[in-house]
Image (spheres, grey):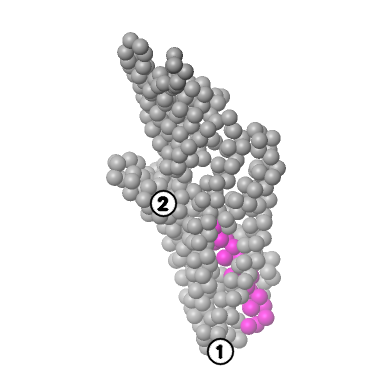
């Protein structure tokens, strides 16, 4: 049985690697096409686009792994079925459940490989790709910071604590510096706003705004519900260093959720990102199991093309359901655990029932 397990496992792993190579190449093509719009902006050139595309590939591979595992398992086991090898295995007394367990073992190996790529390689490379892109496009600004962001824009030094959406940021501090009589720079004003949102063009709207103007005659303070300010700093530039759930490893996500809870802040979107990351990773194992009833049943005599199409359809439907629940569930206030684990639970149930009913 151990020799049989190794043989079936090698088939699944080998074809999954081949499928992933094709999927990653296609992803690289689409990523490179997306980067074309930025070529010529600032100092961002063709070589930068190629380099950034390569840096983003590990994250793409991690996202595509469940679909790749399903297609690879369908093609690998399907080839054995077409050669009647699975029939011989069944005739030798090996149950469908035993084959499914072997497929799960191969899926677990893929899960471990995906964890290394998605949790160790992808996050720092994705962050580095964002920094290269933005520094090349907006080279007239200076930047510092990791958990938050500090940006120097002319005589302003802006601090951003967190990103609420693509065009909205929270926890904003603005420091305005001027040249003093002695030639040294000095702090001229300090401002704070609960949030900053790009409303049009280069206009940022600061909400719940308060500032203190430091003059020779004292300090003048004011408080305004809203205050508009012109700045060439773009949301894309600000977003590269503000904490992004998609670029954090699991440990970083967990720590950030605990930090938000300790400070009484909203954690729903971050909890959804945390549990969804775990559920999607484990779905790699479920996808390999789901392939077993297909190759013993309706796809026993089908070609590799038919099995590939079935794998793509199932993978796309699973991906769309995940996205629908993650986006819609947050809007309707659903429990983060339900949002993240419902698709994986449905997939596990479908795979289990299909394996039991397969003869």
The reply to whether residue 317 is in sight is no
How far separated are the C-alphas under marks 1 and 2? 49 Å
Q: Residues within 10 Å of mark 1 (few under 14, many from 20)?
A: few
User: In percent of the image, x 36 and y 48: which residue is there?
Assistant: 257
In terms of depth relative to the viewer, which is nearer, 356 or 118? 118
Asked if the residue at tag 2 contacts the one at tag 1, i.e. Cβ–Cβ closer than 8 Å, the answer is no
To which quarter of the image does residue 38 belong?
top right
Residue at image position (36%, 45%) is 267
Q: Is residue 67 magenta?
A: yes
Mark 1 or 2: in front is 2
Q: Is residue 87 left or right of residue 109?
A: right
As helix, strand or loop, the secondary structure at mark 1 comes to loop
Extreme residue toward the front, this view: 182
**Residue at image point 36% right, 20% down:** 211
Question: Which of the marked residues, 1 or 2, is nearer the chain's N terminus?
Answer: 1
Side (left or right) of 112 relative to 81 = left
Residue at image x 58%, y 85%? 89
| Residue 42 occupies quadrant | top right
Identity of the residue furthest to the bottom in this view: 92
Task: Give the residue number, with chain letter if any, for mark 2.
Answer: 252
- What is the x, y in percent for residue 229? 48, 21
Where is residue 345? Give x, y as percent: 43, 62
Left or right: where does residue 308 sit relative to residue 358? Answer: right
For mark 1, what is the residue? 92
Q: Is residue 244 magenta?
A: no
| Nearest the eye: 16 or 218 | 218
Q: Secondary structure at mark 2?
A: helix
The magenta segment is: 62-85
Residue 314 on image: x %, y %: 57, 60
Q: Is residue 12 above or below residue 30?
A: below
Main secondary-structure element of the magenta-colored stretch? helix
């Amino acid at each position: 049985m151990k020799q049989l397990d190794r043989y079936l496992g090698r088939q699944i792993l080998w074809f999954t690697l081949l499928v992933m190579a094709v999927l990653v190449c296609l992803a690289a093509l689409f990523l490179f096409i997306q980067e074309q719009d930025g070529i010529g902006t600032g100092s961002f050139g063709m070589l930068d686009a190629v380099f950034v595309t390569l840096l983003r590939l590990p994250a793409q591979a991690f996202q595509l792994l469940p679909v790749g595992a399903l297609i690879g398992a369908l093609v690998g086991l399907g080839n054995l079925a077409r050669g009647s090898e699975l029939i011989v295995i069944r005739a030798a007394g090996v149950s469908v459940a035993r084959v499914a367990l072997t497929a799960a073992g191969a899926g677990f190996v893929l899960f471990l490989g995906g964890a290394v790529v998605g949790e160790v390689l992808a996050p720092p490379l994705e962050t580095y790709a964002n920094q290269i892109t933005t520094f090349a496009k907006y080279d007239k600004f200076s930047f510092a910071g990791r958990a938050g962001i500090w940006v120097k824009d002319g005589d302003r030094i802006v601090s951003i604590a967190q990103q609420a959406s693509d065009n909205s940021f929270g926890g904003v501090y603005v420091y305005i510096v001027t040249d003093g009589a002695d030639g040294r720079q000095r702090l001229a004003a300090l401002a704070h706003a609960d949030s900053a949102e790009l409303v049009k063009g280069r206009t940022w709207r600061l909400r719940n705004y308060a500032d203190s103007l430091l003059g020779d005659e004292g300090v003048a303070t004011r408080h305004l519900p809203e205050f508009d300010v012109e700045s060439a700093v773009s949301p894309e530039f600000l977003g590269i260093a503000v904490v992004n759930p998609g670029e954090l490893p699991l440990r970083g996500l967990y720590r950030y959720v605990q930090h938000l809870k300790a400070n009484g802040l909203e954690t729903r979107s971050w909890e959804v990102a945390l549990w969804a990351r775990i559920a999607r990773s484990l779905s790699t194992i479920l996808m390999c199991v789901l392939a077993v009833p297909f190759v013993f049943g309706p796809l026993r005599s089908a070609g590799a093309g038919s099995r590939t199409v079935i794998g793509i359809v199932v993978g796309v439907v699973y991906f769309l359901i995940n996205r629908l629940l993650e986006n819609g569930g947050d809007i309707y206030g659903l429990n983060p655990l339900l949002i993240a684990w419902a698709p994986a639970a449905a997939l596990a149930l479908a795979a289990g029932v299909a394996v039991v009913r397969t003869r």
